[in-house]
Image (cartoon, rainbow, N blue to C red):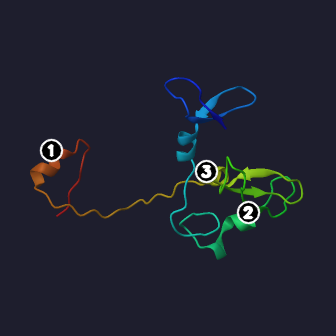
Amino acid sequence: MTTSQSGGNFGRKFLQCLTCSSFQWLNEAMLAIPAPIAGCFSCGETSHWKNNCPWLQSKCKICDVTRSLKVSGKQQTYGWKFLKCPKCSRFQWLYEAIKTAQASTPAQSSTSAEVTLTMKLADFCNSFEAKCTMKK
């Protein structure tokens, strides 16, 4: 983490890659990290409770050993959760693991839906460009 010394952004903190020198403003980087709202006290997802948290049993892709869910104590990443293999020390931020899992899970869709609208029929017909079929 570095602090800007230039005029328009003086004092503003940013993160800079040590390899390629690309950067991101710290406040923008912090917005990209999902904050837990309610639900699981381990990972912050709302689809389950801690006793059913899938991340507490997630396996290392290299060793097939159950990874530990830990919390960072470093200043730049304080409070961020991560998964670490106790055998090979492979590391992954939890928010990245969740994002990867969500991207690889096929979206569930429903083939039928029930919709209730209260409006005049003429307004309804004028509002939609798609073809509609109405049943009495």
Q: Pointers 1 and 2 in contact (CB under 8 A)?
A: no
Mark nearest the camera among 1 and 2 is: 2
Which sits earlier in the primary sequence, circle 2 or circle 3? 2
Q: Which residue is drawn at 55% across and 53% down?
A: 34
- Residue picked out by circle 1: 126
Q: Which one is in front, 81 or 131?
A: 81
Q: Residue at x 52, y 23 (%)?
A: 7
Gap in angstroms between the C-alphas marked 1 and 3: 40 Å
Name the disc covering residue 99, or none: 3
Res. 4 image quadrant: top right
Left or right position of 117 against 69: left
In the picture, the quarter occupied by the N terminus is top right
Q: Which one is in front, 105 or 16?
A: 16
Name the disc covering residue 109, or none: none
- Residue picked out by circle 2: 69
In the picture, the quarter occupied by the C terminus is bottom left
Kindly identify the amino acid type of the residue bearing the numbered disc 3: Lys
Gap in angstroms between the C-alphas marked 1 and 2: 54 Å
Task: Provide residue 78's location: percent of width, then percent of height.
Answer: 67, 54
Answer above or below: position of 48 versus 25.
below
Res. 26 image quadrant: top right
Gap in angstroms between the C-alphas marked 2 and 3: 16 Å
Q: Which one is in front, 32 or 7?
A: 7
- SS assignment at label 3: helix
